[in-house]
Amino acid sequence: MRRIITLTLLLALALCSCSSGGGGAQPTSAAASNAPDPLLEFTGIWKGTSVSSMNAAQVRITLDIKREGNKFKGEYRCAPGNAICRDNIQRGWVTGQVSARGFRVAMEDTSWCIYFMDDFYPPKADGEYTCYLNGVIADQGTFELKGPPQP
């Protein structure tokens, strides 16, 4: 129960868009810590892997992100790695805010995942994710992404 409360608080902090421009947890780089919008450069096609901490299942993921003002949205795709995608769900929809360090992926089966960026140094990013189905944690793990080259 304590873990669920902690994860709920982290979720609220990650998705919060406070009046000060903060998005919860502090960025890890000096440049990012001064930026009011840590995910401002999170656009384009990002490819990588996610690895479940529950069963070591590794899958390939692709995010196609488009920014709209201070928000972004896009498509999520999953392809098999050393395992099939969770519940064989291969498609989802991404939503987020550039002022937060995380984003949400809604899946075809009504489950959803929260991805939290631990490090974001375009064109590289990594972090942790937690997926929920029917209010219960369905999966947790880590992810790494590589995005488009930066100008």
Image (cartoon, grey):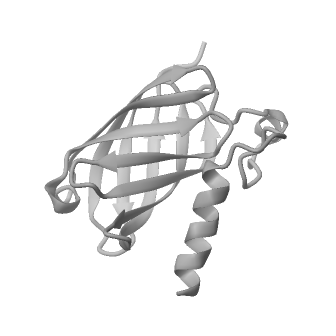
- The image quadrant that residue 142 belongs to is bottom left
Give the x, y percent position of residue 53: 39, 71
147 lies above or below 19: above
Q: Is residue 71 left or right of residue 76?
A: right
* Quadrant occupied by the C terminus: top right
Q: Is residue 114 left or right of residue 49?
A: right
- Residue at 53 percent of width and 38 percent of height: 96
Q: Is residue 68 left or right of residue 57?
A: right
4 lies above or below 26: below
Give the x, y percent position of residue 27: 74, 47
The extreme bottom residue here reads 1
Q: Is residue 61 left or right of residue 27?
A: left
Q: How many marks?
A: 0
- Is 43 or 2 nearer to us in this picture? 2
- The image quadrant that residue 35 belongs to is top right
- Residue at 58 percent of width and 18 percent of height: 150
14 lies above or below 72: below
Give the x, y percent position of residue 30: 83, 40
- Residue at 17 percent of width and 61 percent of height: 87
- Is 144 or 1 nearer to us in this picture? 1
